[in-house]
């Protein structure tokens, strides 16, 4: 775990208490690698850029564990002082006494504070980072919850989550007091030209690479997929976004199961595509019409039931170029935000 | 999408295709009509060569085997696709046609308590097949199986080698919850549910062995290419083995 040194080294861990769990809140990090050959999903935060930004705002490296909130976030009690940030979709955020707090900004909580993450007005997922990262148990090299297979559980009322308290109870002048004992950083993460770390506007456009199985689909099926809007089904989850819309006719005949990847667009016999997300299984037997490009997979994690999604085709080479450029800019931006945060938390 | 030239190993064409921008899929296609050489030994030899060539290479994340294909997952921000492709081509050249021969590995015997509450579909399966339940069990335990793929859930083995006489379609309505350890049949395959999950396979018995344990290395009991047999046990033995693991 990489986090700012000397702010919490010698202090015992504190236990945040979950007072309200929210709709579906889980601890996630960057996921499990090296175990997919045993059928273990990659998993991890679905909107990786938002999780990384939340971490950077509190001075953490991107691999620190965060809490992924879905639709409505949790309410937590912090017995010891800490710094938190919430990023991703536009979620309402409140202090103990109901004072609204900003998202995408570091918030200093003195001992005995409560934080409530309300409902999302745009987007679907937000990430709550705590300075030093949530200290839950690491299983198969990751703190990511994989509730379906007994690795961690969604938050429940009364759960206790370990964190490193920060050494000083009151911040310096770079913070303004929002309400008693709660301070908001005067600086923000700033913005970035393509507004990563914010919920996308609808319709949510995602770029995808046509699979080499695409040739098995009829022209009509391909036209429906690339030119028609789809609505996100309420049955969607961390494994995949299920889409409803014009039928994309699946090729006839049985297919042999093959490995799949987060982003794979499977078309089951119903003709309603499923876009796999990071917690997807490792193999699948449905034909795949396309694969969502890595650069746009975070956007899809912000699609909520009812959201409208549209696909645009991108070549394999362009998808790689776009992703590399995105990562390069994200790294530089996160580096600046993290350095600023570390300076203002550890002074 | 770009499909590269293919490499031929024994009677198999190995074709490479990018799957999105984070995976390279290697697919085996039978170059000879009669299927002289089985795909599995060739796939395992490729997997082994890839492990040698790709071990410790930054940006290479995972490798997953399926029936006749294999995916290498990578981070295109860390390793350029062209570089990965060159390394994979080198690995394919490493594959010695001889090591793609059948290897007579020892079989793992899986104890199974058939029927009753542990195999709620055994009677129905027997009725569909016009066999006695004992005959279904007899044919299931007489077989020698091979792990063709791990998937669906962590540690879930898809086993080939089922006797054609006991091949039976999936249930028309899947169960909302299949117990962990359940042994099922779906078409020509048999398999074991490592976790309590929804599932549509016909459940004929249950094993007390844990198929997946995140504290174990490797975490899965079975891996592609392993040989498996089934051994019928009674409830008493089931409970005994189960206690040994808890």
Image (cartoon, coloured by chain):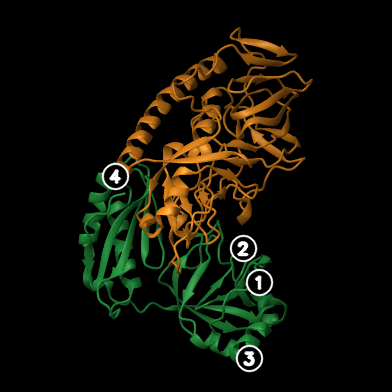
Chain colours: A orange, B green
Vertical arrangement, residue A169 with respect to residue B104, above or below:
above
Q: Residue A178 in the image: x percent, y percent?
A: 70, 13
Measure the alpha-carbon separation of dots 3 and 2.
Answer: 26 Å
Chain letter of mark 2 equals B
Camera-nearest label, 1 or 3: 3
Q: Which residue is mark 1?
A: B242
Confirm or deny contact between disc 4 and disc 1 (CB under 8 A): no
Disc 1 secondary structure class = helix
Camera-nearest label, 2 or 4: 4
Asked whether, in this view, residue B177 is left or right of residue A211, the answer is right
Same chain check for tags 4 and 1: yes
Disc 4 secondary structure class = helix
Disc 2 secondary structure class = loop
Going from the N terminus, do you reach mark 3 or mark 4 first? 4
Measure the alpha-carbon separation of dots 4 and 1.
Answer: 47 Å
Same chain check for tags 2 and 1: yes
Camera-nearest label, 3 or 4: 4
Residue drawn at (30%, 78%), measured in percent from left and top?
A: B35
Q: Which residue is mark 3?
A: B134
Q: Residue A131 in the image: x percent, y percent?
A: 58, 27
Residue drawn at (48%, 20%), measured in percent from left and top?
A: A337
Residue A29 seen: no
Q: Residue A340 in the image: x percent, y percent?
A: 49, 16
Going from the N terminus, do you reach mark 2 or mark 4 first? 4
Going from the N terminus, do you reach mark 1 or mark 3 first? 3
Measure the alpha-carbon separation of dots 3 and 4.
Answer: 54 Å
Going from the N terminus, do you reach mark 4 or mark 1 first? 4
Q: Which residue is mark 4?
A: B81
């Amino acid at each position: 775990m990489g986090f700012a040194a000397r702010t919490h080294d010698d202090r015992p861990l504190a236990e945040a208490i979950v007072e309200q769990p929210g709709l579906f809140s889980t601890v996630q990090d960057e996921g499990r690698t090296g175990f997919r050959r045993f059928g273990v999903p990659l998993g991890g935060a679905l909107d990786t850029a938002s999780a990384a930004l939340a971490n950077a705002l509190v001075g953490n490296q991107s691999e620190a564990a965060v809490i992924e909130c879905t639709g409505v976030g949790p309410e937590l009690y912090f017995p010891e002082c800490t710094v938190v940030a919430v990023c991703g979709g536009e979620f309402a955020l409140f202090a103990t006494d109901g004072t609204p707090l900003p998202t995408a900004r570091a918030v200093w909580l003195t001992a005995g504070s409560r934080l409530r993450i309300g409902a999302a007005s745009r987007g679907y997922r937000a990430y709550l980072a705590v300075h030093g990262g949530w200290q839950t148990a690491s299983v198969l090299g990751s703190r990511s919850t994989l509730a379906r297979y007994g690795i961690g559980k969604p938050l429940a009322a009364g759960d206790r989550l370990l964190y490193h308290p920060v050494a000083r109870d009151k911040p310096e002048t770079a913070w303004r007091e929002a309400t008693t004992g709660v301070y908001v950083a005067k600086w923000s993460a700033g913005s970035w030209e393509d507004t990563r770390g914010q919920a996308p506007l609808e319709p949510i456009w995602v770029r995808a690479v046509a699979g080499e199985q695409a040739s098995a689909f009829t022209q009509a099926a391909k036209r429906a997929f690339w030119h028609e809007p789809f609505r996100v089904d309420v049955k969607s989850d961390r494994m995949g976004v299920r889409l409803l819309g014009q039928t994309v006719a699946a090729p006839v005949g049985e297919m042999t199961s093959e490995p799949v990847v987060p982003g794979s667009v499977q078309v089951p016999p119903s003709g309603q595509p499923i876009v796999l997300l990071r917690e997807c299984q490792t193999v699948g037997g449905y034909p795949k019409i396309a694969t969502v490009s890595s650069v746009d997979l975070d956007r899809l994690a912000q699609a909520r039931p009812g959201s409208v999604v549209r696909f645009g085709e991108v070549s394999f080479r362009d998808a790689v170029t776009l992703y590399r450029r995105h990562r390069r800019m994200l790294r530089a931006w996160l580096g600046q935000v993290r350095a600023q945060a570390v300076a203002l938390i550890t002074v | 999408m770009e499909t590269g030239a293919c490499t031929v190993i024994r009677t198999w064409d190995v074709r490479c295709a990018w799957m999105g921008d984070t995976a390279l899929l290697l697919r085996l296609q039978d170059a000879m009509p009669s299927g002289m050489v089985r795909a599995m030994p060739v796939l395992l030899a490729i997997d082994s060569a890839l492990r040698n060539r790709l071990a410790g290479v930054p940006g290479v994340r995972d490798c997953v085997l399926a029936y006749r294909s294999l995916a290498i997952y990578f981070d295109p921000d860390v390793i350029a696709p062209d570089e990965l492709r060159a390394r994979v081509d080198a690995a394919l050249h490493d594959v010695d046609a001889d090591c793609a021969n059948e290897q007579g590995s020892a079989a793992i015997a899986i104890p199974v308590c058939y029927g009753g509450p542990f195999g709620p579909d055994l009677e129905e399966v027997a009725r569909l097949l016009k066999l006695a339940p004992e005959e279904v069990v007899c044919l299931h335990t007489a077989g020698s199986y091979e792990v063709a793929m791990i998937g669906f859930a962590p540690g879930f083995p898809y086993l080939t080698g089922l006797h054609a006489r006991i091949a039976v379609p999936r249930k028309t309505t899947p169960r909302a919850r299949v117990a962990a350890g359940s042994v099922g049949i779906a078409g020509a395959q048999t398999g074991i549910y490592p976790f309590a999950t929804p599932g549509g396979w016909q459940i004929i018995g249950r094993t007390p062995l844990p198929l997946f344990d995140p504290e174990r290395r490797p975490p899965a009991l079975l891996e592609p290419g392993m040989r498996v047999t089934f051994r019928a046990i009674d409830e008493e033995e089931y409970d005994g083995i189960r206690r040994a693991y808890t």
